[in-house]
Amino acid sequence: MSHEDKVFFSSFIGVLVVLVVMAFAFYFIADIVTSDMDTGGRLRQARIEENIKPVGQVNVGSVPASGEAAETVAAGPRSGEQVYNASCLACHSTGIAGSPKVGDQAAWAARAAKGIDGMLATAVSGLNAMPPKGTCADCSDEELKAAIVYMLSESGF
């Protein structure tokens, strides 16, 4: 074996030893860092679940709602003016996307000719740029009808 071969093998063995020592060092460092886990990894699982738990919960169904929503439901249906101010005002006060402005008798005349039930059917299903139930997805038909009557009365019908 030549001198160059001996130098190569000794360098190779030296690099191999350094890599093995580094691997053990990384293993022991990882063991120290994760030493707060019990044998089954339950503590780590608890931390993961804590990190990904939902911020809030949605109330659907039989559990009574709390806060303002519960007061609204308990108070019964909203008046036409309340529904208009909460959901209809944005479009029907400015005429956005061709919606008839409240107070514009000419714009409401053709719609009023359909009658309240016809207008309610249009409001429930939506028309042109108006989505179904306008912007009041939680309104009952009774509340929508009250809002229509309110807008018609404010427009002179």
Image (cartoon, rainbow, N blue to C red):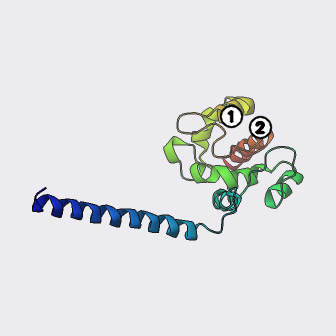
Which residue in the structure is indicated by mark 1? 124
Residue at coordinates 59% horizontally, 66% vertically from top-left? 34
What is the quadrant of residue 35 in the picture?
bottom right
Asked if the residue under mark 2 is in contact with the one under mark 1, i.e. CB atoms within 8 Å, the reply is yes
Q: Position of residue 83 (x, y in %)?
A: 73, 50
Query: What is the distance, in whole Å, between disc 1 and disc 2 at their CAs?
Result: 8 Å
Residue closer to the observer: 104 or 15: 15
Please, what secondary structure does the residue beneath circle 2 have? helix
Is 67 placed left or right of 52 in the picture? right
Identify the image quadrant of the N terminus.
Answer: bottom left
Is 2 placed left or right of 148 in the picture? left
The residue carrying pointer 2 sits among few (fewer than 14), some (14 to 19) or many (20 or more) residues within 10 Å by Cα, namely some
Residue at coordinates 64% horizontally, 61% vertically from top-left? 51
Q: What type is the residue that disc 1 sits on?
A: Val
Residue closer to the observer: 152 or 118: 118
Q: Position of residue 88 (x, y in %)?
A: 64, 49
**Which mark is first along the chain, 2 or 1?**
1
Q: Position of residue 7 (x, y in %)?
A: 16, 64
Mark number displayed over residue 157:
none
Which residue in the structure is indicated by mark 2? 141
Q: Position of residue 37 (x, y in %)?
A: 66, 64
Q: Is residue 25 above or below residue 145?
A: below
Is 153 placed left or right of 9 in the picture? right
Identify the image quadrant of the C terminus.
Answer: top right
Q: Is residue 48 above or below residue 33?
A: above
Please, what secondary structure does the residue beneath circle 1 have? helix
Q: Is residue 8 above or below residue 106?
A: below
Q: How many discs appear?
A: 2
Residue at coordinates 58% horizontally, 33% vertically from top-left? 127
Residue closer to the observer: 101 or 72: 72
Is 21 placed left or right of 144 in the picture? left
Q: What type is the residue that disc 2 sits on?
A: Asp
